[in-house]
Amino acid sequence: MAESPLLDAMAIPSAQTPAARKAAADRQATLDALAGIACRHVNGQVMEMVHRMVAAMLDMTSAGPDPRLAARRVKSGNLLRENAYAYFHLACSGIELALSKELAALNPQPGAGAPVALSLVPLEEIDQKLAFGAVSRPFDIQYSEQLACLGVRLGVLLGRDLVRAAGNPFRPEVFLVALEEAWREFEPEPEAHGLVAPLLRPGLVFDLGPMYEALNEQLKPARARGADRFAKTDDSAARKAERARREASMSQQLRRLFGAEAAAPEPGDLEIPLIPDLPPGAGGWRPSAAGFAPAGQASGAAPPSGHAADAHAVAGVAAAGAPAPLLDVLARMLPAGAMVPASAASAAAAGGAHKVFYLPRLRADLPRGSLSRGDETTLDLLSRIFETVLLDESIPPETRGLIEFLQVPVLKAALRDRSFFFEEAHPARRMLDLLSKAGWEQPQGADDPLLHAMRSSVGRIATQDQPEFAAAVAELEAGLAAREQAEQAAIAGPIAQATRIEKQAAARRSAQRAIAVRLAGEEVAAFVSGFLEQRWTPVLTFAYSIEDSKPGAVDNATRAMDDLVWSVKPKATQEQRKALIKSLPGLLTTLNKWLDAVRWQDAERLQFFAELAEYHAAIVRAPIEVSPERQLELAVEAAQRDALRRIAQEQAEAAGLEAEDADPATAALAALERGMRLEFSGGGAVRKVKLAWVSPLRSLFIFSGAGRQEAFSLPAERLAEAFRSGSIKVLAPEGVVGRVLSEAVAVNDATSAAA
């Protein structure tokens, strides 16, 4: 007889896709993490529980009239007291093993084992299960809300509706059975094995509440964890790490461009390939107001005669059989100090009537092959860098005039040490980037301290054969720091006000969210829900605003809110009603202290507490007409309904946050850092500004305009909308040297790919 295709399909396990295998591995990792959390919480309380068990066994007031039972309790109590660590080890190991078995049954691995043969369950096991059902019932009722929430979250993790109470691997019964089995293994006398089961009751066994709270927190969506708190959303550390990664990648690409794969070799030892022609600047290389031609020389005129003469000399050296070192060429063409008549400062003040060297013209005049490949590559890159800077009309002419003097000093520095191209912190590269950024704003006048620092630092470099760029950079950085300090002082008032407003608004949002989450998952009396929305929102807002100075304020106010919500729920057992009566004095004291703090003192407050007292009295006096089993069923059903509603709202909020993260405008907003330059466009006008300040929670941004224009602020929402509409863009967040080098690498990569 032919075999059934259905049997064949059942015999061959279906192959899992890589995505399915990864999802299964992630689920298992999460379950393992949950087991670890549970074990840590429980193990930390077992020894204290052992001490309570010893005291209960040795308490003869509850031993009963049987002298043999009393003697048995004393003997077992002393045994446990003297060997507490032995039982501690057995209990912890038993709990860990029990959790492992429960989790394996909850999330079985495909093909993990052979089919299980059906067999009858022994009567003793059935009796024990029924007995422990009664033992665990008080715990099930006490933690019904947390267990229901945990069951829903486990169901979400496993792709189910929910995990029922009987299948929850962290249900109280699992821990209680493990404790009883550990006692049976610990106590050698069989007649004493029944002594522990009556002791497994709330108040004597460890508290499972903190464990369930930690498990539920672990299973929350990543974006929802800690959502009740507001915190800085500044991800500068992540941006710094990403920037470092990009810099390392760029360094490796440049080293390949220079023919160095790993470590930077010594200068002069590089085997450097010729890079392709770089893209021209805007409009090509041309004389401009930046001072590309000495005074009296027409735009586009031939370069000074010395350039051509030295170019012929270089060509002659090359024809003799060896390329000429560019440093030697520069030494013959420009002796030390020959670039400027006196100093960069005096030259700039003279309006550009000075002799200036032009790297692009030198590169054009030198015959191909007259220089080594390394020198040619260095000269090509630096020519493009200076072309970019000196043609940038957003930089004032005074600054461009100063940057002209850096051409030869920077070229010499790069020829001596080509880490100029690999490291942003190289002093010569840092100097060029700082000057181009510092000159973005118009100087206040001839006496501008920053302009003076720029002139002084350039003059220090331009008159030295081997300039000390580090000292010049330090001087320029000091000038920039002074200007930054002055700018921050000018906007100190708006910053302080904006910080206060932002903190208050964030505190109110956090308070409203915390209350909304709780009311969405609870069936709360109308007068209590109204109280929370109208009167407890200011309390939570106040708690959030003082959390930094008084840590724990938020937890205290939130716990009081949760206790109030719990207090007005029906209490189906005497134990619950006793717990309510016991907790009321502390709850009322805490509520009144917080209401005093927010100064709510009118008659409405007295009416609320009077109505609350009547409601509590009605809960305590209500008859108990259902069996313990039905009480548990009702508690579990109500808790599951609340948990489903609460987690549905939580997931919707998390999905909304993830959608925000996927928004390019949100990503652009998150990448903004103080000091960045941006361009606003609209109505036919373009305005270039600098980001002068970002609020701690990144909800407000203050900008200062070029040329000391008046500062203005924008909230994050309007700024994000500007990014979406395209009316704002970031202007070159990296330094000018890095931008040009990135273009060179991109051109080289494109050329290599085409080849």
Image: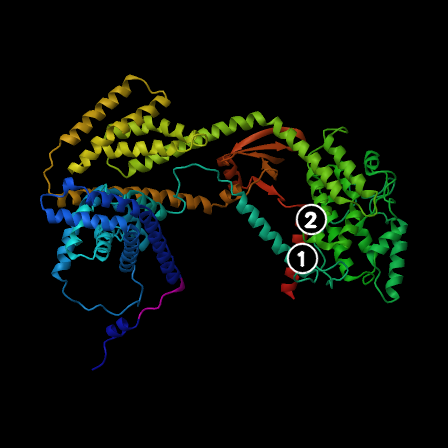
Q: Position of residue 323 (x, y in %)?
A: 83, 63
Identify the image quadrant of the N terminus: bottom left
Name the image quarter holding the C terminus.
Answer: bottom right
Q: Is residue 473 magenta?
A: no
Name the quadrant containing residue 404: top right
Look at the picture and state if 452 lies above or below 135. Answer: above
Mark 1 Cα-neighbour bin, 10 Å: few <14, some 14–19, many ≥20: many
Q: Amino acid at mark 1?
A: Leu
Q: Secondary structure at mark 2?
A: helix
C-alpha distance separating marks 1 and 2: 13 Å
Residue 353 pos. (x, y %)? 86, 38
Q: Alpha-carbon neighbours of circle 2 within 10 Å: few (<14), some, or many (≥20)?
A: many
Q: Mark 2 — residue?
A: 737
In this orientation, which residue lies closer to the viewer: 715 or 755?
715
Q: Secondary structure at mark 1?
A: helix
The residue stretch that appears in magenta: 13-18
| Count of residue discs | 2
Residue occupied by mark 1: 254
The image shows residue 730, relative to residue 254, as above or below, that is above
Whether residue 390 is visible: no
